[in-house]
Image (cartoon, grey):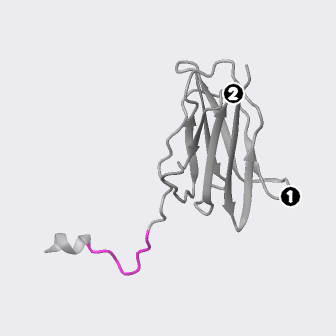
Amino acid sequence: MALLLGLVASPTAQAAPVAAPAAEECTGSWDRITYWAKNPAGRNGGGYARTYWNNTTKKNCVKFWSSPYDGLASRITLAIFDEGGDYSIDPPKEHPENYRYYAGPLYTWFNSTGQCIRVSGSLVRGGVTYHLNTGPIRCG
């Protein structure tokens, strides 16, 4: 009986904060550049992306995080395009989700040695939509 009483929560106990989900990461080397999403006025904010090159698989990878990482962003989307016209998107069109922390990681489909990639995405934070568009990057 004493054991059961020891497991009962106190009525004044507070619930622990909900932790962010574990984030899958890109593999490879980060280029040390942070690509910020822009608000309608062109200012950085809301979220950022980082790209990685994996020399073993010969693929680029990108991930887009909400910033701050507090789960208050919504409708986070991400796309990576290579010079051959191939692309990956997250969430996939056939399974749209309402991400609140990050999108990705996304990888190029094929060997992208020497090819430029482009990254685009968006998220909504505080009613403001932030857009990410890198133009050609990681060329060569």
> Is 113 in the magenta?
no
Circle nearer the N terminus (2, 1)? 1
Q: Secondary structure at mark 1?
A: loop
Q: Quadrant of the C terminus?
A: top right
Closer to us: 77 or 66: 77
Q: Is residue 86 left or right of residue 43?
A: left
Residue sitting at the far bottom: 11
Q: Main secondary structure of the magenta part?
A: loop
Q: Residue at x 69, y 39 (%)?
A: 119
In the image, the segment drawn in magenta is 8-15
Residue 95 is marked as: none
- Whole-angstrom CA distance, mark 2 to mark 1, is 29 Å
- Asked whether residue 14 is drawn in magenta, I would say yes
Which residue is label 1 attached to? 41
Instruction: Name the quadrant containing residue 86.
Output: top right
Above or below — where is 107 with respect to 133? above
Graded by Cα atoms within 10 Å as few (under 14), some (14 to 19) or many (20 or more), the crowding at tag 1 reads few
User: Mark number for residue 83?
Assistant: 2
Q: Amino acid at mark 2?
A: Glu
Q: Kindly identify the residue that appears in the image at 47 percent across and 48 percent down.
A: 22
Judge left or right: residue 124 versus residue 101. right
Left or right of 44 on screen, residue 96: left
Indicate the position of residue 47 as horizontal and vertical percent values: 69, 51
> In this image, 32 relative to 27: left or right?
right
